[in-house]
Amino acid sequence: MQALGAVFGNDKGPLRDHADRTMVERQLIIQLQCLRHDKAVVSEPVRGEGGHQIFVVDFTSGKNTASVHFTTVKGPSDRWYVEVFEIVVLQNKGFCSKAGN
């Protein structure tokens, strides 16, 4: 959970360092349930607004496939953080497992 918490953030740094711990842990658990996959292919980045970089990740899990946009932002010490990704696309494509599955 700590390692994943270091990846998600914004221009201020990782969320785990400046957001409510309970909220961050809940958010990461939900994201983990949706990010399970057998294969992922990451595109080259495309420049977005405000210096963001956008990656398209093609996920495969069993017979399910989905192309998901991940938006990254540069934070302190020139580190990049995932600011947001299209979790609804994964939900709609059957990637999100229910708790305990």
Image: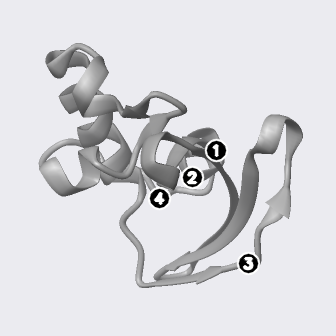
C-alpha separation, residue under disc 3 versus residue under disc 4: 20 Å
Whether pointer 3 and pointer 1 mark residues with C-beta atoms closer than 8 Å, the reply is no
Report the mark closest to the observer, 1 or 2: 1
C-alpha separation, residue under disc 3 versus residue under disc 2: 17 Å
Dot 4 amino acid type: Phe
Task: Give 77 or 89, whichever is nearer the viewer.
Answer: 77
C-alpha separation, residue under disc 4 versus residue under disc 2: 5 Å
Task: Give 53 or 92, whichever is nearer the viewer.
Answer: 53
Q: What element carries label 1?
A: loop
Whether pointer 3 and pointer 4 mark residues with C-beta atoms closer than 8 Å, the reply is no
Q: Is residue 94 left or right of residue 14?
A: right
Q: Residue 43 carries which label?
A: 3
Whether pointer 3 and pointer 2 mark residues with C-beta atoms closer than 8 Å, the reply is no
Dot 1 amino acid type: Glu
Q: Name the residue under label 2.
A: 90
C-alpha separation, residue under disc 1 versus residue under disc 4: 12 Å
Q: How crowded is mark 4: few (under 14 residues within 10 Å), some or many (20 or more)?
A: many
Q: In this view, does 68 lie to the left or right of 9?
A: right
Dot 2 amino acid type: Leu
Residue 9 x/y as whole percent? 44, 37
Q: Residues within 10 Å of mark 2 (few under 14, many from 20)?
A: many
Q: Mark 4 points at which residue?
A: 95
Decide: is 89 above or below 64: above
Report the mark closest to the observer, 3 or 1: 3
Q: Which of marks 3 and 1 is nearer the N terminus?
A: 3
C-alpha separation, residue under disc 3 versus residue under disc 1: 15 Å
